[in-house]
């Protein structure tokens, strides 16, 4: 009798540990279904965000009204499939995904002054910071506010939540909300939402923020460890010993893995092997090397192996956080643990120190106000890099219907463009929602 396993089948091991698998042919009765006709192909969606504008002011003094900004090298001059790659988009070439990505330019979020003083639908008040959040992420108008009163609140459900309701199916995690910037370093008030990009609505229709996870290790454990209470005290002790010794979660399901692999076809064996190899590689990055003897006080659930949150210079290992969270999104999709994710690479009005990332020690927001367009383009390219890498990860991951990219839509959004700032009365400002752009892939 041909092997047939359920789509939610997991590898089980000692102490209740379980590891999910990607979608395999054997889960569909062993028949490969055509790409266009497949009724079982999962659809997926990822929205990423960066707290940058598409201009640079290159001034340390002067009012916003008199400061003239210039656009960074982002928008291609040549339209079409073979568009030219500008400085801020060079990672698309580095990861060989330019042909998979569209650059959508000339976008605008309207403001109150051009609508008789009333904030238009899908628009914002005349003030800028954090007030592009609601129209950008949820398509709803921002409420008036400035300074401490403008907290990047969305007034409706964001795109990730709307899409999750449509395609989430029976996945264990309807949507994933991640943030690579460990905290909002500027610390604007106790009720600040500038570090949040996912919102849902409650039973009364009121918008509610979805707190993002900024710890890759916590995200990995929540998605893949599936630790339940062991059946016996001896199993619990043995499981804990293995985990304290920093064994891979794959070691705990090795027996189940060996039994399954011997019964799979060649294509499914290849998918499972690649999937488990990627889990092990991610564990290596997230697990510290042993530097001292393990003691009885070292129990499961110890602090993740990540840079300390805020090293005093507004940096918390964001490069590694961003890379690991992209890996986790890809693995979550492979396991069908979730089909929708949001990833905030940097917050609204971000003060993330770009020194370790591009060699210029200044906050992301400050770079747009005080430095040249070449430096600003490098800061934007850091965001583009992680978007491009995630596109490449999905492109290079086989799915039953081709690659995972074939059934995934990815969008990269930014906080602002360059142009009119109605609040300051400036015609060329980085505090603008004119000439905005986004990247779309998949």
Image (cartoon, rainbow, N blue to C red):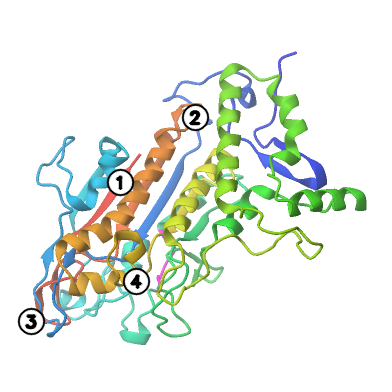
Residue drawn 40% across and 71% down? 155
Residues in magenta?
A: 153-158
- Residue 246 point in image, percent of width and height: 70, 50
Front: mark 4 or 2? 4
| 7 drawn magenta | no
Are circles 3 and 4 on residues that touch, CB within 8 Å? no
Residue drawn 76% across and 61% down? 299
Q: Which residue is mark 3?
A: 66
Left or right, residue 441 beside residue 207: left
Q: Which residue is mark 2?
A: 399
Query: How far is disc 1 from disc 3 in space, using C-alphas?
Result: 34 Å
Q: Earlier in the sequence, mark 1 or mark 4?
A: 4
Are circles 2 and 1 on residues that touch, CB within 8 Å? no
Q: Count neighbours of disc 2 (C-alpha within 10 A) and say few if under 14, some if 14 to 19, many if 20 or more.
A: many
Query: How far is disc 4 from disc 2 in space, using C-alphas?
Result: 36 Å
| Picture quadrant of residue 129 | bottom left
Q: Main secondary structure of the magenta part?
A: loop
Q: Earlier in the sequence, mark 1 or mark 3?
A: 3
- Residue 228 point in image, percent of width and height: 78, 52
Are circles 4 and 2 on residues that touch, CB within 8 Å? no
Q: Count neighbours of disc 4 (C-alpha within 10 A) and say few if under 14, some if 14 to 19, many if 20 or more.
A: many
- Residue 341 point in image, percent of width and height: 48, 52
Residue 219 in view in this figure: yes
Q: Which residue is mark 4?
A: 350
102 versus 118 height, above or below: above
Residue drawn 55% across and 46% down? 282
- Residue 56 point in image, percent of width and height: 16, 68
Q: Secondary structure at mark 3?
A: loop
């Amino acid at each position: 009798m041909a092997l047939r396993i359920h789509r939610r089948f997991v590898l089980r091991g000692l102490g209740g540990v379980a590891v999910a698998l990607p979608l395999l042919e054997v889960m569909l009765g062993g028949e490969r279904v055509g790409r266009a006709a497949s009724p079982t192909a999962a659809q997926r969606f990822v929205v990423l965000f960066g707290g940058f504008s598409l201009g640079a002011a290159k001034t340390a003094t002067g009012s916003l009204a008199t400061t003239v900004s210039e656009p960074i090298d982002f928008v291609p001059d040549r339209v079409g499939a073979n568009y030219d790659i500008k400085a801020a988009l060079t990672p698309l070439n580095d990861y060989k995904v330019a042909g998979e990505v569209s650059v959508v330019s000339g976008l605008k979020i309207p403001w109150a002054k051009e609508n008789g003083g009333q904030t238009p639908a899908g628009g914002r008040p005349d003030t800028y910071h954090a007030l592009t959040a609601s129209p950008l992420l949820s398509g709803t108008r921002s409420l008036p506010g400035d300074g401490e009163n403008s907290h990047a609140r969305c007034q409706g459900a964001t795109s990730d939540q709307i899409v999750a309701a449509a395609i989430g199916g029976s996945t264990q995690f309807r949507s994933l909300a991640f943030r690579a910037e460990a905290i909002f370093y500027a610390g604007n008030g106790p009720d600040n939402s500038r570090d949040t990009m996912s919102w849902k609505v409650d039973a009364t229709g009121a918008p509610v923020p979805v707190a993002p996870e900024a710890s890759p290790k916590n995200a990995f454990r929540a998605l893949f460890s599936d630790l339940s209470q062991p059946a016996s005290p001896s199993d619990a002790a043995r499981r804990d010993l293995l985990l304290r010794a920093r064994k891979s979660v794959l070691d705990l399901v090795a027996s189940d893995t060996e039994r399954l692999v011997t019964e799979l076809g060649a294509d499914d064996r290849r998918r499972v092997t690649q999937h488990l190899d990627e889990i092990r590689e991610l564990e290596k990055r997230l697990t510290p090397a042993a530097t001292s003897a393990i003691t009885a006080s070292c129990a499961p659930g110890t602090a993740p192996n990540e840079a300390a949150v805020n090293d005093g210079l507004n940096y918390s290992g964001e490069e590694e956080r961003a890379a690991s969270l992209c890996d986790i999104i890809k693995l979550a999709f492979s396991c069908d643990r979730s089909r929708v994710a949001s990833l905030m690479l940097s917050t609204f009005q971000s003060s993330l120190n770009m020194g370790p990332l591009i060699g210029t020690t200044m906050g992301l927001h400050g770079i747009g106000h005080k430095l040249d367009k070449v430096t600003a383009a490098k800061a934007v390219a850091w965001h583009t890099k992680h978007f491009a890498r995630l596109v490449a990860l999905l492109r290079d991951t086989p799915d039953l219907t081709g690659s995972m990219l074939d059934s995934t839509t990815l969008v990269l959004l930014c906080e602002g463009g360059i142009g009119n700032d109605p609040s300051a009365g400036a015609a060329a400002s980085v505090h603008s929602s004119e000439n905005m752009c986004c990247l779309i892939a998949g």
